[in-house]
Amino acid sequence: MQHKPNRWQPGKRDILFLALVVTVITVLTLGSTERKTKPLPDDKVHRTTTSRAACMRCHGPDGVRPQPPRHTKDDQCLLCHQQPKGWVGSAR
Ligand code: HEC
Ligand code: HEC
């Protein structure tokens, strides 16, 4: 096959290859969960709560809004849940 320098005509294999690349990128993007889940609501409570213990008073098993049953036991909530804009805690 001969291609002229500036005119690339994608063939079937090129299309397949591109589709593969796009798929891989999509899977990797969706697969990374870092701070991709629900952010904290932007309200007074969530702007001013800075300790896990405080979070868990409402989000523990007996709180008003328990974490989902299979939720991680990980302590660092903000690793995954983005804090609201005016959050009073230290930047993390
Ligand atoms: C005074 C109780 C209270 C405290 C303290 C509290 N929350 Fe919440 N939180 C709620 C309630 C009620 C909701 C659901 C209603 C809403 O969206 O405002 C909620 C919603 C959430 C959501 C999103 C849920 C959704 O459906 O979008 C996340 C994530 C969350 N809280 C995490 C935290 C973290 C992390 C902390 C500690 C920094 C915390 N909360 C402190 C009561 C609390
Ligand atoms: C490793 C990442 C990670 C960490 C750390 C984390 N969460 Fe979550 N959390 C998630 C994911 C993912 C979901 C969504 C689960 C689902 O939809 O079933 C979630 C869901 C929630 C919900 C329910 C939201 C709703 O729809 O009602 C609450 C409340 C919550 N998390 C609170 C917390 C609190 C409080 C902490 C810290 C003690 C915390 N999370 C730490 C990943 C995390």
Image (cartoon, rainbow, N blue to C red):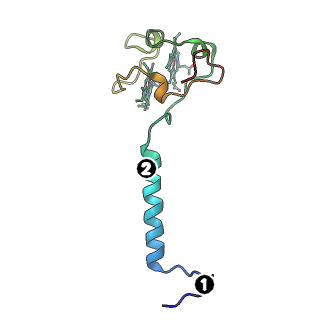
- Return the x and y of residue 40 as percentages of the image width and height: 55, 24
Q: Residue drawn 53% across and 24% down?
A: 92
Mark 1–mark 2 distance (CA, rounded to whole Å)? 33 Å
Q: Cβ–Cβ below 8 Å for labels 1 and 2? A: no
Whether 20 is drawn above or below 32: the answer is below
Q: Residue furthest bottom?
A: 2
Residue occupied by mark 1: 5
The amino acid type, in three-letter code, at marker 1 is Pro
The amino acid type, in three-letter code, at marker 2 is Leu
For mark 1, does the 10 Å Cα neighbourhood hold few (<14), some (14 to 19), or many (20 or more) residues?
few
Q: Which mark is residue 28?
A: 2
Q: Residue drawn 45% across and 13% down?
A: 52
Secondary element at tag 1: loop
Residue 4 in which image quadrant: bottom right
Q: Residue drawn 44% across and 38% down?
A: 33
Q: Which mark is residue 35?
A: none
For mark 2, does the 10 Å Cα neighbourhood hold few (<14), some (14 to 19), or many (20 or more) residues?
few
- Return the x and y of residue 54 as percentages of the image width and height: 48, 9
Whether 16 is drawn above or below 44: the answer is below
**How many discs appear?**
2
Label 1 or label 2, whichever comes before in sequence order: 1
- Return the x and y of residue 19 as percentages of the image width and height: 46, 66
Residue 57 in which image quadrant: top left
31 or 79, which is in the foreground?
79
89 or 71, which is in the foreground?
89
- Return the x and y of residue 78 as percentages of the image width and height: 49, 24
